[in-house]
Image (cartoon, helix red, strand yellow):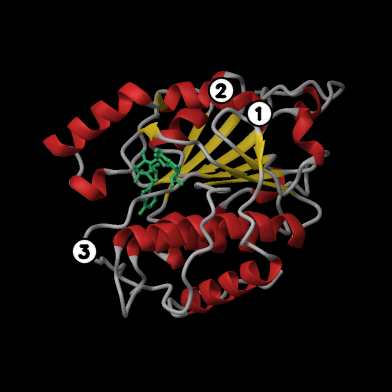
Amino acid sequence: MKRDPSAPHPLRAGDPAGLNVAVIGGTGGIGRAISRSLAARGANVLVAGRTFRDADVPGIEFRPADLSLMREAERIAHELPAETLDLLIFTTGILAAPKRRVTAEGIEEDTAVSYLSRLVILRAIADRLGTGRDQRPRAFVMGFPGNGQVGTLGDLNAERTYRNMAVHMNTVAGNESLALDAAKRYPRLDVFGLNPGFVKSEIRGNLFGPGTLRHRLFEGALGLVTTSTDRYAQRITPILTSPDLATRSGAMIDRKGAVIHPTPGLTDARVAEFLNESTALIARAGVTVPPK
Ligand SMILES: NC(=O)c1ccc[n+]([C@@H]2O[C@H](COP(=O)([O-])OP(=O)(O)OC[C@H]3O[C@@H](n4cnc5c(N)ncnc54)[C@H](OP(=O)(O)O)[C@@H]3O)[C@@H](O)[C@H]2O)c1
């Protein structure tokens, strides 16, 4: 959608029309619902993922990427039109499987998809993000921030011990660390953590087997007490584009759009330790994460 050059930038007006957005993980689940919601309000949305489901939706463009691979994350980062982006939103996610699974690069799958691919992409494009726009760009890292998870370091790839929920909690701590670190590392950007609470989606497929009766029954029961992806997206879309966020970089945002406290144990030292071990693991896949 063409923007009237004399109109205030959409992030100053709190209006998504004309915003340029990339949703990494925007092909399914919560990311897809947010992408559709933003596109319906006139944003230009680029989604990255494996399976495009919105070819018929005006305003949504697709970039295929298997983000279990660090080299794919690096490739897509270089392909993104970072300079013209206003919002960068990370929503890729899986849950660690009952038995440890590794990617072709030898990285535990949940750690790779739900966390490390985001670190690769954000670090690769942060310097270019929004440089061609006249408003501070925003990055949103979805996970479960503010929940007290500080992770377990020393075996991030779960090679010595594998417990699927402990591995997933490492991705939770990793994503909150990523948001906290980026808010300080990139003063030119506004960076936020997003905690959607429990939302009925496909993310628990790995626990039961996607589409199995147990999975459908569980999500059906969860649907009685939790919200749908569309309802969450309707609620969060005005927050993502609100002028009120302009002075809140580093904040964590809960399912209702309220600012919540970050996890107290994620001190600067802990965050640095977390990211150092993460970049070392990514390096094993032959990908170097730029320090800045
Ligand atoms: N749902 C909840 O209750 C809940 C609660 C707390 C936090 N969260 C967080 O919310 C975020 C979104 O979760 P969700 O519930 O929307 O999950 P979901 O329905 O399973 O969607 C996951 C998304 O990740 C993408 N994805 C998965 N594997 C990928 C791969 N190898 N390469 C590229 N993309 C891949 C999927 O795209 P394709 O289908 O194209 O592969 C899809 O877009 C995650 O960060 C999750 O931790 C969710």
Tell which of 54 and 200 is nearer to you.
200
Label 3: which secondary element: loop
Residue 276 - label: none
Q: Amino acid at mark 3?
A: Lys
Query: Which residue does the numbered mark 1 point to in the structure image?
Result: 239
**Nearer-N-terminus badge (2/3):** 3
Label 1: which secondary element: helix
**Nearer-N-terminus badge (1/3):** 3
Q: Amino acid at mark 2?
A: Arg
Left or right side of 94 for 45: right
- Looking at the rendered structure, the number of numbered marks drawn on it comes to 3
**Image quadrant assignment for residue 57:** top left
User: Do the residues under discs 2 and 1 have CB atoms within 8 angstroms?
Assistant: yes
Q: Position of residue 170 (x, y in %)?
A: 45, 62
Image: 51 above or below 178: above
Q: What quarter of the picture does the N terminus occupy?
A: top right
Left or right side of 177 for 230: left
Q: What quarter of the picture does the C terminus occupy?
A: bottom right
| Real-space CA distance between mark 2 and mark 1, rounded to the nearest whole angstrom | 8 Å
| Real-space CA distance between mark 2 and mark 3, rounded to the nearest whole angstrom | 36 Å
Label 2: which secondary element: helix
Q: Position of residue 27 (x, y in %)?
A: 41, 38
Residue 235 - label: 2
Judged from this view, the residue extending furthest toward the right is 6
Image: 99 above or below 205: below
Residue name at image x 46 percent, y 79 percent: 154
